[in-house]
Amino acid sequence: MARDSRRGFLRKAGLLSATNLFGLVAAKSWANNLETALNSVQHLSAEQLATEEDFWYYIQQSFTVSAGIINLNNGGVSPAPRSVQDAMKRYYDYSNEAPSYYMWRILDQGREPLRARLAEIAGCSKEEIAINRNSSEGLETVIFGLTLEKGDEIVAAKQDYPNMVNAYKQRELRDGIKMAWINLELPSEDEDYLVQQYVNAFTAKTKVVHITHIINWNGQIIPVRKIADEAHKRGIQVIVDGAHSFAHFDFKIPDLGADYFAASLHKWLYAPIGSGLLYVKQNRIKNLYPLFAAPNAQDDNIRKFEALGTRPFFIEQAIGKAIDFHHMIGIERKQKRLHYLKNYWMEKVKSIPGVILNTSLNSKWGCAIGNVGVAGKKPSELDSFLLNNYKIHTVAIEWENIKGVRITPNVYTTTKDLDVLVEGILQFSSQQTK
């Protein structure tokens, strides 16, 4: 499909009138202008829109990202759109006018509507969603809250997130549970291989399996539902680390067959830094102890997991604006764009001598996150080269058998940014082969 010029695109979207041109730079009008732009491309499929640079350039303007650096480490934490930042700052100022009144009696009353909106995205009951600070807090609530006895076994992967690995090691040391660590060879597009690695580790003593939906090191998507089904056949509970999957691509939490699921909302929902959610299946709530003591530890009310004391209400309530932004773009459009960006740079570098791709290009097995290495070189060397010579921020990964530089673009990333990345990888690789 032929691409229009940016001027042509904006004219078609009705954005070049004097009134609307002012709206382009007026933060308070941004939501309406974005909606106008989205309405103008309703005739395009999500896949077609994924390649329309003029449209995504326009989306970029709702972020306040620095022009002095190309941020390709959105996998760590994503910046929030301007509308979310403004809401958080406004709620913070509001709280400080009379903290105990405005926080506890006004802002705190917004938690229930917010819970319902998050549950809508998650595809579950609002009585299964707790609002917290990040996926580590949510998952550790589960890991430390499960009733386990000495000798009980838990299956997890060496490629899981370090906070979770350490939490299980602590329970192993403290309570005498037994960990069965599987070692995944990644990337993989072999569903049977991935499922069987977990299933083969199950024994009569296995009580829990921990599955990372997207391996954060290289973006590998794990077939959670098939593993969960096998676990449930054996009476094994399923914990899912959804730190990188929630609001990243299209799924509903119940579709995964998870008993427990946690996510960081400051990643792919673009909520304020320090916001997350915990899902606990309704029939599992009663027997899961909260991480922070609640009046009734064995209550079947999901709110027992929110007994955090005083917390930043201004952060929590700004999640609502992130949900607005998420719905404006739409999960299908976001997913298609993110996968397109990952494949855009990977397709361009895969034939460069010495370059090693550690992520699948297939949309079933990967989305935004990619990982690249150069033969004979440490990931930290490529990471430093890109930052020092091209002002590209990435992260070097050396965890278990995954070694490379993680590249994570976002909806505000342009293909021009990725062209710079490709040039950097080419230059680094060419220096190594001389």
Image: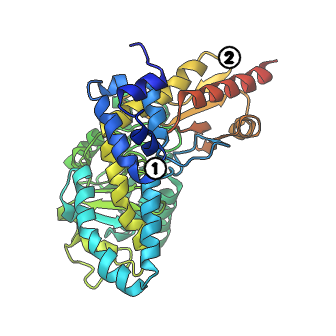
Instruction: Give the label, 2 or 1, closer to the camera.
Output: 1
Residue occupying the point 45% across, 33% down:
56
Amino acid type assigned to the residue bearing label 1 in the image: Ala
Residue furthest to the top: 2
Q: Is residue 249 visible?
A: yes
Asked if 89 appears above or below 189 in the picture, the reply is below
Per the image, the residue denoted by label 2 is 353
SS at mark 2 in the image: loop
Which quadrant of the figure has residue 149? bottom left
SS at mark 1 in the image: loop
| Quadrant location, the C terminus | top right
Q: Position of residue 104 (x, y in %)?
A: 34, 82
Q: How is the image coloured?
A: rainbow
Q: Position of residue 177 (x, y in %)?
A: 41, 64
Give the class, few, some or many, for how many residues have Cα within 10 Å of label 2's Cα (few <14, many ≥20).
some
Q: Is residue 143 visible?
A: no
Q: CA distance from mark 2 to mark 1?
A: 47 Å
Residue occupying the point 23% across, 48% down:
257
Asked if 148 appears above or below 335 in the picture, the reply is below
**In the visual, does 323 lie left or right of 350?**
left
Which quadrant of the figure has residue 386? top right
Q: Nearer the viewer, residue 189 or 93?
A: 93
Residue occupying the point 74% across, 27% down:
428
2 or 1: tag closer to the N-terminus:
1
Q: Which mark is residue 13?
A: none
Per the image, the residue denoted by label 1 is 26
Amino acid type assigned to the residue bearing label 2 in the image: Pro
Give the class, few, some or many, for how many residues have Cα within 10 Å of label 1's Cα (few <14, many ≥20).
few
**In the visual, does 416 lie left or right of 264?**
right
Residue occupying the point 58% across, 39% down:
406
**In the visual, does 168 lie left or right of 48?**
right
